[in-house]
Amino acid sequence: MPFEEFDKLGPLRSLVGTWEGEGGVDFSYHHAEEETGETPYRERITFNPFGPVDNGDQHLYGLDYRMAAWRGDEADPFHTEIGYWLWDADAGMVLRAFMVPRGTVVLAAAPATADTKEFTFRAQAGDPVHGIVENQYLAQRASTVSYECSVRIGDDEFSYDEDTVLRMTEFEDLFHHTDRNILRRVPD
């Protein structure tokens, strides 16, 4: 996408590039220990611009992204994602569509304007528009009920706080799996 097209990315324009964060915290259930706990992690996300994508008279611009997170100095990531962050200017909506290799797919949305610097993606299981689907194993043992991710974008820094609510066989109540990190732009 030519540089002059970046404005068509709306609130996503300043995310183009590569980002890293060393201070991530993942709160989750640790199956090996059969207990909950926090895991520190480092993370790398690369956002590449594209567009327009035309659906009839809908025109989307976006970022395809790849994310990986590592515990400490492990060579292999413990979590990865691939997907898209999309800007729908006419609807005033930022969309995030992604898949994790555990077999979960999410399409979450956040109301926004072209100059928005903070927004919150939301998706609900069973929602036919902004929903969550998963494989059979997860549906039976660790089903995702809802997903929420609050994003704050600065010039050379962005952060997120994420809450994935699960119905797990290990717990009577719903479980909140949370992640948070602050990432800084790095040279490509």
Image: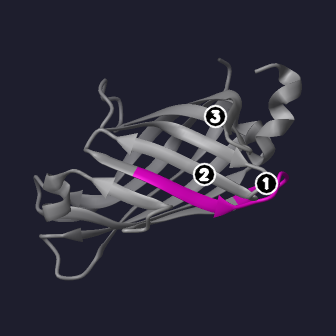
| Amino acid type, callout 2 | Leu
Identify which amino acid the numbered label 3 is placed on: Leu
Can residue 38 be spotted in the picture?
A: no
7 shown above or below 150: above
Residue picked out by circle 2: 95
Separation of marks 2 and 1 at Cα, in angstroms: 13 Å
Residue 48 in the magenta stretch? The answer is no
Q: Mark 1 points at which residue?
A: 90
Report whether 87 appears left or right of 167: right
Residue 104 drawn at (x, y percent)? 31, 49
Few, some or many residues within 10 Å of mark 2 (<14, 14–19, 20+): many
Residue 70 appears at what percent x and percent y? 37, 35
Which range is magenta? Answer: 106-118
Tag 2 secondary structure: strand
Q: Going 63% across and 34% down the picture, which residue do you hit?
A: 63
Circle 3 residue: 63
Asked whether the beta carbons under mark 2 and mark 1 sit within 8 Å of each other, the answer is no
